[in-house]
Image: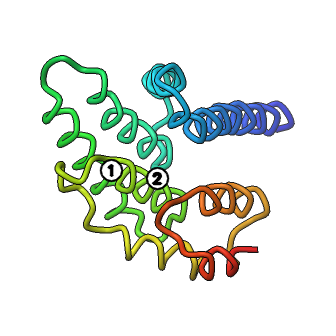
Amino acid sequence: MKLLLSFITAFIFFFQTDLEALRNSYAKSNLSNANTEAFINLAEKQSGSDAVTGGYKAAAQIMEAKFAKKNRKALVKNGATSLESIIKNNPNNIELRLIRLSVQENIPKIVGYRGSMKDDKVFLINNYSKQNAAMKSYVKKFVTQSKSFTDTERATIK
């Protein structure tokens, strides 16, 4: 029994480490092309099948269009479709909403993938207080640098 409990704990710890690495890489991905490529490579290597990992993989696929010579439209469409599907199945996951909002605010307007920005922004503001300390910190970092939030809205995220 102790062996099984140890195995499960080790598995959860290992999984959390991968997710933390994805979060950190994603947060830095917009700073440079090298960081974007590092995030894409890290996301592609992830074997996790949970919704949040899937959300980061979808975001990486959308970002990959930035560097692709061919099939750029297909990469964006497939990534966006995947992200929308994951969010549809997990509508109350704040991290998935944050991923979608960050993708939509950074994608060129001509692509047309911007329909959920207002909803996601309201969702983040309304559900921020219900999150654990780590997720609050992650959301707060995003909100402080986001172009979508006003100073008044940023003040509500403490």
Q: Taking 101 as reference, is 103 above or below it?
A: above
| Residue 83: mark | 1
Category of crowding for the residue at label 1, using alpha-carbon neighbours closer than 10 angstroms: few (below 14), some (14–19), many (at least 20): many
Q: Position of residue 56 (x, y in %)?
A: 46, 41
The numbered dot on residue 6 is none
User: At x 17% / y 50%, what residue is drawn?
Assistant: 110
Q: Which numbered mark, 1 or 2, is in the foreground of this view? A: 2
Task: Name the side, left or right, on which 38 lies relative to 70.
Answer: right
Question: As shown in the figure, which amino acid type bears the numbered disc 2?
Answer: Ile
Label 1 vs label 2: CA separation? 9 Å
Is mark 1 in CB contact (under 8 Å) with mark 2? yes
Which of 46/136 is in front?
136
Residue depicted at x 54% and y 57%: 95
In this rendering, is residue 46 above or below 51? above
Q: Secondary structure at mark 1?
A: helix
Q: Position of residue 2 (x, y in %)?
A: 86, 36
The image shows residue 21 at horizontal and vertical percentages of: 65, 32
Q: Nearer the viewer, residue 109 or 63?
A: 109
> Which quadrant holds the N terminus?
top right
Q: Nearer the viewer, residue 47 or 11?
A: 47
Secondary structure beneath dot 2 equals: helix
State the residue position of label 2. Answer: 99
The residue sitting at 13% across, 19% down in the picture is 70
Q: Residue at x 36, y 68 (%)?
A: 117
In which image quadrant can residue 35 be found?
top right
